[in-house]
Amino acid sequence: MRIKALTIRILRQIIRDKRSLGMLIVAPILVLTMLHLVFNGDSYIPKIGFVEVPDAIEENMDLGDAEITHYDNTHDAQVDLLSQEIDGYITLTSGVPSIYLEGSDPTVNGETLRWIQSTFASLQESLTEDLEVSYLHGSSEMGQFDYFGPVLLGFFVFFFVFIIAGVSFIRERTTGTLERLLSTPLRKWEIVSGYVIGFGIVTMIQSTIIAAYTIYVLDMMMEGSFFYLLLIILSLSFTALTLGILISSFANNELQMIQFIPVIVVPQVFFSGLFNLETISNWLSWIGPITPLYYAAEALRDVMVRGFGWNEIYMEICVLLGFSALFMILNILALRKYRKI
Amino acid sequence: MNNFCVSIKDVTKHFGKHVVLKNIHLDILEGEIFGLLGPSGAGKTTLVKELSGLDTPTSGENIVLGQTMPKLDVINRIGYMAQSDALYEDLSAKENLQFFSSLYGLKGMKLKERIQEVMKLVDLTEHVNKLVSDYSGGMKRRLSLAIALLHEPELLILDEPTVGIDPVLRKKIWDAFYQLNEQGTTIIVTTHVMDEAEKCDRLGLMRDGSLIAVGTPSELKQHTNSATIEEAFLVYGGDVDEN
């Protein structure tokens, strides 16, 4: 009854603040769209020079996906290489190909080399049949965005819920309404629960829209069930919410709340698998397992990329709910500052 | 009429080394309007917060409506209005009232009735659907009072209820207090305005965390041979440097 009243009040306030509500949904969609465009753009087409490559060989090669320029001598090729007209060139000295790369951009190097290798490999078809590559997870179409996507989805939910919940709790404190709430028979756990349910509903709607957009419009890989995805996101948002409220009790105003972002929110991104965790220095690697986003990202990836179900993700969900429960207890203890019972 | 509504027994409060309340003894009777008068920093707010259950004494005890505070079921019988208006500005007056009455367990017809009654009492009936952010300062103060009255409390604790309010409005608010008092509500009000003190049945004069005198306004004036409460206050040991 009292929790319901608190939930309705929070929902009313959020709905009335059209701009925050818009930001909650539009901002993540905007950023995810941009990242999609950046990471899933067309693959790079290498520009390659052929220096005196015999026609007989060239005819046997698959020259798609590259821009070929022909040169009569190495010198001309080198001039073009210097002015970055081409990314690399190939010469055949007594039947053995040698490759010369411009070399200043590692991505371009990789693409150029890959093209050359695959093209020349197809020449030696007499030796081996085409290698058939199969994937345990993902596919050859899987882009970087598909790998980042789940982490980013989790991150945005965490970030916005953390900020909005924290700021509204600070407002509750600074305007004196928290004191007024505590001068009513409302119990402390009821305050925290009302917040969790109110924001839980908002996050549910927010993450459904964002997840649906990334999956169906941006075509992010989605192997598992949408229901599990929402379950993970909901658990994560509870964690973000309870942590946001807890952190807000260490801030005296909205600006101080914002100052916690680089300390509490941003570091989690580094340990959530956006960067390869195995290359992190040993003395830092303990941080990952204590950040909520680490578990959420793992579970989201399990569902979205690996198509796993409940058996693989329940541990992560339990950990997230454990974090939430811990933060809720700490919140109730923190509220003792305002009323002992 | 002679039952104690509030008994403050040897209450002392420290914030670190700073002593805010020193050995306060005070009994407040059922059905009276009791004023706590003193300059800001005298400890009035701390004392009424303890009575409302929002703070606890370092030593001593506060017995409110027969029970040692803080107790949730006593809190349910107290109406508290803090110095700040404590309203949700992005909601309408009605939504604020609905929210707080649900916290007190009101619902359905009873809830609607009470909202109408309290808004009539504070003369805001025609502004009930306005957003609080569109309210003037005086209207917010009155709405805040209306919220404290929603659950028909037996004891009303008001911390500087008329601060920053013009004389006409102040009279209106005091008329509301008298009306509630006639219906049997005990009212504790803090103030640092001397003419407001005259309106109380009894007064407690506070200074630097101590209660320096208790009595009816006329008693206090008689004892000190003063014409005004202000003079009486000075005789009892406060030199009022404010206001």
Image: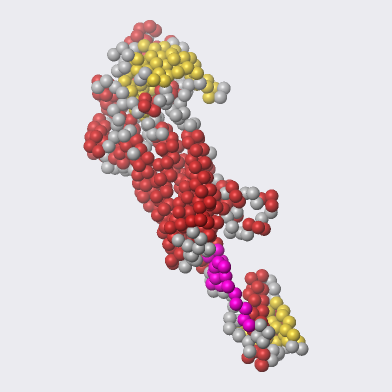
Q: Which of these two is toward me, A181 or A82? A: A181
The magenta segment is A129-147
Does A109 sit above or below residue A269?
below
Query: Which residue: 73% across, 82% down?
Result: A98
Magenta-colored stretch includes residue A139? yes
Query: Which residue: 29% across, 24% down?
Result: B177
Residue B36 lies in what quarter of the image?
top left
Residue at the extreme bottom of the image, as rendered: A56
Q: Which of these two is toward me, B97 or A220? A: A220
Magenta: main secondary structure: loop
Does A115 sit above or below residue A180?
below
Q: In which quarter of the image is the C terminus of chain B?
A: top left
Query: Which residue: 53% across, 63% down?
Result: A306
Q: Which of these two is toward me, A10 or A291? A: A291
Judged left or right of residue B130, residue A260 is right
Judged left or right of residue A170, residue A90 is right
